Image (cartoon, helix red, strand yellow):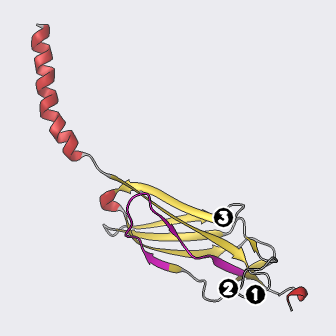
Amino acid sequence: MEHKSTMVNLFITLLIFPFITTCTVKAWTGEIHGRVVCDVCADGSVGPEDHVLEGAEVAVLCITKSGEVLNYQAFTNSRGIYTVAETMPESERWDACLARPISSFHEHCTHLGDGFSGVKFSYNHVSGYTHAVKPFVYRPVSIPIYCG
């Protein structure tokens, strides 16, 4: 009786195993990161007076290969870096993305620099690839006197 039960289990396993292996979905992981900085003198160059912005909000919108639009919200860390990452089925991976700054919560540096409204890019990378976005730059509403 025990032998018959083992044979039935083996038979069922052999029937189901090919189905399970063909139904597995290959995972894909993508990552996008960037930096948000304050150009204190609004001179367009990085100097000792400039600093990163912690807590700045960035939105990242991605469209997948299947046409679904995914909206991500990220905030910068103490080094001014934001990161968005997701693991999904390979067939649903990102096709193109748009990263754009939303707001800076810094008390002085709140004016978005010219030409920094957003960055659109294709995302045709293999799983595990990290895409770096150019820095978003905020400027103070009024430039400090020492910048003159």
Side of 136 where 11 appears, left or right: left
Q: Nearer the viewer, mark 1 or mark 2?
A: 1
Mark 2: secondary structure: loop
Disc 3: which residue = 76
Q: Which secondary structure lies at badge 1?
A: loop
Quarter of the image where one finds residue 118? bottom right
In the picture, which quadrant includes the C terminus?
A: bottom right
What segment is highlighted magenta in the picture?
120-138
Residue with the mark numbered 2:
113
Q: Nearer the viewer, residue 62 or 48?
A: 48
| Percent of width and height locating residue 141 | 79, 85
Pinpoint residue 67: horizontal percent, then vertical percent.
Answer: 33, 70
Label pair 1/2, CB-CB below 8 angstroms: yes
Compared with 34, 7 (above or below) is: above
Amino acid type, label 1: Ala
Q: Is residue 129 magenta?
A: yes
